[in-house]
């Protein structure tokens, strides 16, 4: 296998990411963003994921790229099929992933000299995990081979 040093000098690359932001060339962004090797398109859509439109995908299809990486926030969410028509007609590839994966994949593809764009959609607010109060259980062996279930309230621990 032949290894080559990635040549990304002078191109936009992701230098950091975290909850609700990405950094491109050490500049922090927290709004919807398209990243191309030679330019950035901030606020490429005002829509959230649920309200994306065909027009948003027409903009992505018009870019000089082979592949579009769609970062859909903290979760992988696939756009409705009718939204993809502009990309299909333009014969552009689409990969859907969370924002962090889109950043990493973009940097790898840029290093390979590929024509790639990353379209990032930030959630309106950070997605908080749902916490449910579930009873905690412990199985204890009273008689060898027979188990008894003990249930505790979470606040009693």
Image (cartoon, helix red, strand yellow):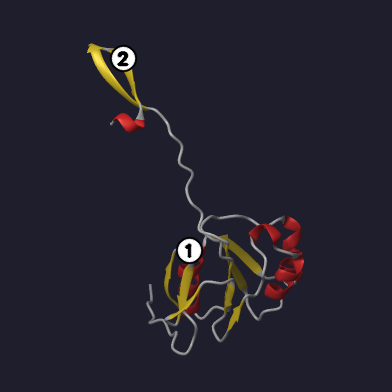
- Disc 1 target residue: 101
- Picture quadrant where residue 148 is located: top left
- Picture quadrant where residue 44 is located: bottom right
> Which residue shows up at 51% across the image and 54% down it?
127
Pick the front one: 25 or 112: 25
For the residue labelled by badge 1, is the local secondary structure a helix, a strand or a loop?
helix
Q: Which residue lies furthest to the top in this view?
A: 143
- Answer left or right for 146 relative to 21: left
Q: Which residue lies furthest to the front in this view?
A: 155
For the residue labelled by badge 2, is the local secondary structure a helix, a strand or a loop?
strand
Pick the front one: 135 or 37: 135
- Answer left or right for 33 relative to 140: right
- Disc 2 target residue: 148
> Which residue shows up at 61% across the image and 70% down it?
68
> Which residue shows up at 71% across the image and 69% down it?
57
Quarter of the image for the N terminus: give it: bottom left
Query: Label for residue 129?
Result: none
How far apart marks 2 and 1 lie (CA) works out to: 44 Å
Pick the front one: 81 or 5: 81
Q: Position of residue 19 (x, y in %)?
A: 45, 63
């Amino acid at each position: 296998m032949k290894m080559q040093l990635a040549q990304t000098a002078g191109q936009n690359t992701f230098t950091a990411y975290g909850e609700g932001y990405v950094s491109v060339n050490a500049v922090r962004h927290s709004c919807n963003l398209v990243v191309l090797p030679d330019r950035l398109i901030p606020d490429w859509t005002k829509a959230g994921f649920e309200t994306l439109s065909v027009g948003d995908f027409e903009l992505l299809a018009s870019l000089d790229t082979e592949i579009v990486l769609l970062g859909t926030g903290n979760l992988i969410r696939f756009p409705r099929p009718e939204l993809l028509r502009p990309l299909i007609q333009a014969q552009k590839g689409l990969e859907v992933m969370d924002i962090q994966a889109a950043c990493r994949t973009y940097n790898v593809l840029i290093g390979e000299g590929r024509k790639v764009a990353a379209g990032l959609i930030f959630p309106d607010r950070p997605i908080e995990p749902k916490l449910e109060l579930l009873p905690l259980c412990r199985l204890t062996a009273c008689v060898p081979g027979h188990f008894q279930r003990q249930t505790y309230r979470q606040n009693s621990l």
